[in-house]
Image (cartoon, rainbow, N blue to C red):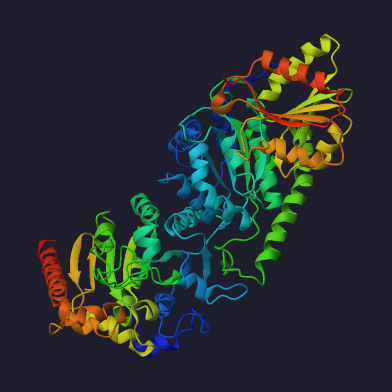
Amino acid sequence: MPNLKELSKKEPLFAAGHRACAGCGAAIIARQIMMAGEQEKVIGLATGCMEIFSTIFPYTNWGCSLIHNAFENVAATVSGAESAYKALKKRGKIKKDIKFIALAGDGGTYDIGLQSLSGALERGHDMLYICYDNQGYSNTGFQRSSATPMCAESTTQPVGKKTQGKKQNRKDITEIVAAHNIPYVAQSAVGYHNDLIAKIEKALAIKGPKFINILSTCVLGWGTKPADTIEVAKLAVESRFWPLYEIENGVYKINYTPAKKVPLADFFKLQARFKHLLKPENKALLIELQTNVDKNWQKLLKKVECS
Amino acid sequence: MPKSTKNLLAKTANESVAEAMKQINPDVVAAYPITPATEIVQIFSQFVADGEVDTEFIPVESEHSAMSACVGSAASGARTMTATSSQGLALMFEILNIASGLRLPIVMAVANRALSAPLNIHGDQSDTMGVRDCGWIQIYSETVQESYDNFIQAVKIAEKAFLPVMVAMEGFILTHCMEPLQKEKTEKIKKFVGEPKSLYSILDQKITVGAADIQEYYMEHKKQESEAMSTAKNIINKVGREFKKEFGRSYDLIEEYKTTDAEVVIVVTGTTAGLIKAAVDEQRAKGKKVGVLRIRVFRPLPYQEIRKALTNKKAIAILDKADSYNSFAGPLGSEIRGVLYNNCKANIINYVYGLGARDISFDDVYKVFDELLKIKQSKKQTFELKYIGVR
């Protein structure tokens, strides 16, 4: 894969001038997806922030074909496009090679789009599904999603006099997708362009359904400073809250092991959505969340060992 | 029914539509089974399994995904088809609007079935009437032959109007009952439908489809869609004429049966027209001036043709195989009343009948005609909503 200098010289296929918030993780991800690989891409995009900030008619940031259908059906939509491509290729009506990418936020992936995603994975379409996971419904003002971590504040599970944000655990979509036994599943995060682009390029070279879940800082939803977007995502990885790993044909591999254990509180302290957890009265909650992160890391290590 | 019985097959509408699909050999079919449309997909799957077609068949996990995949496929320039019914069509509702808004020539067979609740798998028109404002062309079939013929014409209509087309055929009455079918030669059908046509393809051009479209442009795009629906009327007529030239069977937007000199007329859509035609013959033998007007194409609404056919009538009954639950009229009742406003002095009764496939008999139809003949002289203009055959 090309180095950073070479990447920066590539023709930008996700153009500047989008309407995302300053410091939006999703916009960085869109740009890096379009930097990955040399193949012609057709992208399906679910309704969400990315669609709104990049496709306001008559403008588009996309230098490849893009289709937006609805919120919950990007996987089905791309499975239709990919099937059309197969049919037209078979009939000699199309000669070139095209790679298909479905792109959605955590709402369109974990929640409303889960059935469509599962169906498409099971049918085995040759597509890469990418989730930019900002852990909440950012486009509508950061309501909770099933990707929202426990205790995080959201507009539908706010911190109040009686409750401390989300009461439930985050759904582990990466593992749910892995249970479909598809050839390639991975997690990445904004700020790790080498990791992300290498994973996209690897995925695009594999036939069949692939899935990459990318942690994406949301300035408005997470209550972070625009300048901290990369720093916050890096702390998510360094604290082992968000491990960078991949599952290739069932074999687990951790792509990056933090040199030292960064406490979860360090990841939390840059974000307004977790600020209540740093109060002395919520110390028990913070310990519980740290324990969960440690357990999950151990579980991941076991999966690497066993696979 | 065809005049010559030579080469006739005994087929259901489901079998006939599956046959038509095979003969057309579309690029992509994405479908999910639902009674009473299931057989179409099942029979077609066998054609795929036997290599009789080389269509890419997508066995999706829901009707929502069926229509979503159809959108992805049709936007890729592929000739795309599906079939569904009732709850399946209701589940597609969101994407039906997107298919028409993106001007995608998708063709869908709908086996008409009642909507839940209560659960009923039998044929009424609640489902297609429920999606009447989704921007799809709607063609209602009276017979198995017409289901087959409509489905073939639908491909050409969709690809000229760049609008999706649904061909409605009542569940069980058409989908599961055998009638004579004049099946046409595959080469002739292939020649008739021609090569697939689309407005654009995301595989050919580098374009953004389905962009966010705010106040500055949305309304212009929707106006274009509305104009496309107006233009579709001429396209449907033209395709009908081409079909007649090629295959000998003639189809118009509406079908008038003994209406020219009729004093009273029943307006209906779908299979019940057949029953009423037979009832008209009986009544005519007794000297009663009665007729029936069948709405074959409901979207676009052939309002000029309907107005012309009904202007001088003295009394009209509009039969709806669905209710609008607006306490005023069924879907046909409301719209035809609107078409006739200021153009017709007839007294009008709107009947809801056949919900959940409650049977309608000759006697029911005779009673309607009797009622119309009774009120035809009445000076007082009335518009009533009644139910037929309900306890």
Q: Position of residue A121 (x, y in %)?
A: 35, 54
Residue B279 seen anywhere in this rendered image of the structure: yes
Q: Is residue B349 left or right of residue A129?
A: right
The C terminus of chain A: image quadrant: bottom left
Q: Position of residue B83 (x, y in %)?
A: 53, 39
Front position in the image: B136 or B42: B136
**Residue at x-position 51% and y-position 36%:** B115
As rendered, which of B380 and A222 lies closer to the eye? B380
Q: Is residue A149 left or right of residue A114?
A: left
Examine the image and state in which quarter residue B101 appears. bottom right
Q: Determine if residue A90 is in view.
A: no
Which quadrant holds the N terminus of chain A?
bottom left
**Count of numbered circles in the view:** 0
> Residue B192: x percent and y percent?
70, 40
Residue sitting at 79 percent across and 31 percent down? B382
Q: Nearer the viewer, residue A232 or A68?
A: A232
- In the rendered view, tell whether residue B174 sits above or below residue A161: above
**Residue B98 against residue B111 in the figure, above or below:** below
From the top left corner, tell me how far across and down residue B362 is, in percent: 68, 14
Is B73 drawn above or below residue B375 in the view shown? below
Classify residue B291 as left or right of residue A56.
Answer: right
Residue B147, quarter of the rendered image? top right
> In the rendered image, which quarter is residue A166 located in?
bottom left
